[in-house]
């Protein structure tokens, strides 16, 4: 570990070990990074920060030139860095928090399929007008979701299924 152990001191009946942290915090950071098994990129970012503090006397432009990185990239990681939590240098997931769900009901899907089969040569705008004429009450409830339904059903799925028939 990154701790240096010395002989224990005796106080009364107890032996108290004297533990001293490494005086150089940059060496301590590197050892902690090894123990945490940080990725190569996170270790590289840690090297940037150590170089910035030690070699260049906190000069960002020299650090960026030395490592060949953009200043905006450097400042992004410098601001994100927390010396108590070295995991802040790891890449974070870019996966969205919420996935899109289907924005149409099975009933809408069936109705569009029927219209598409009945009027094979109509485009999506004409089918949309026909759908609105037939089912005015339902469309008002789901007006924003209707375009997504048509893009998905009329343009992609239904023509493929009709070709298969």
Image: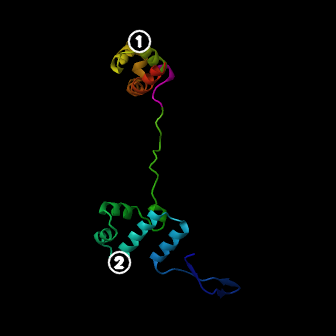
- Helix, strand or loop for disc 1: helix
User: What is the total number of numbered labels drawn onto the structure image?
Assistant: 2
Which label's residue is closer to the chain start, 2 or 1?
2
Q: Kindly indicate the quadrant of the structure image that contains residue 83.
A: bottom left
Place of residue 104 in the rendered image (x, y in percent of width and height, measured from the top left): 46, 26
Along the line of sight, the residue nearer the viewer: 53 or 47? 47
Q: Kindly indicate the quadrant of the structure image that contains residue 89.
A: bottom left
Place of residue 71 in the rendered image (x, y in percent of width and height, measured from the top left): 30, 63
Q: Is residue 22 left or right of residue 13?
A: left
Q: Residues within 10 Å of mark 1 (few under 14, many from 20)?
A: few
Residue 100 drawn in magenta: no
- Helix, strand or loop for disc 2: loop
Residue at horizontal 48%, vertical 21%? 164
Tell me which segment is drawn in magenta.
102-108
Residue annotated with mark 2: 55
Q: Which mark is residue 134?
A: 1
Place of residue 109 in the rendered image (x, y in percent of width and height, measured from the top left): 47, 21
In the image, residue 126 sits, relative to residue 97, either above or below, namely above
Residue at horizontal 48%, vertical 67%? 84
């Amino acid at each position: 570990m990154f701790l240096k152990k010395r002989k224990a001191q005796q106080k009364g009946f107890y032996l108290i070990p004297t533990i001293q942290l490494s005086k150089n915090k940059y060496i301590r950071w590197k050892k902690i990074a090894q123990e945490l098994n940080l990725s190569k990129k996170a270790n590289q970012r840690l090297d940037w920060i150590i170089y910035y503090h030690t070699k260049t006397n906190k000069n960002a432009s020299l650090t960026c030139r030395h490592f060949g990185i953009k200043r905006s990239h450097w400042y992004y990681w410098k601001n994100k860095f927390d010396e108590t939590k070295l995991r802040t240098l790891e890449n974070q997931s870019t996966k969205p928090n919420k996935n899109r769900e289907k924005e149409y009901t099975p009933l809408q899907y069936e109705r569009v399929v029927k219209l598409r089969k009945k009027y094979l040569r109509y485009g999506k705008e004409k089918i949309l007008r026909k759908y609105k004429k037939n089912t005015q009450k339902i469309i008002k409830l789901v007006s924003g979701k209707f375009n997504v339904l048509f893009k998905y059903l009329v343009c992609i799925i239904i023509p493929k299924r009709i070709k298969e028939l």
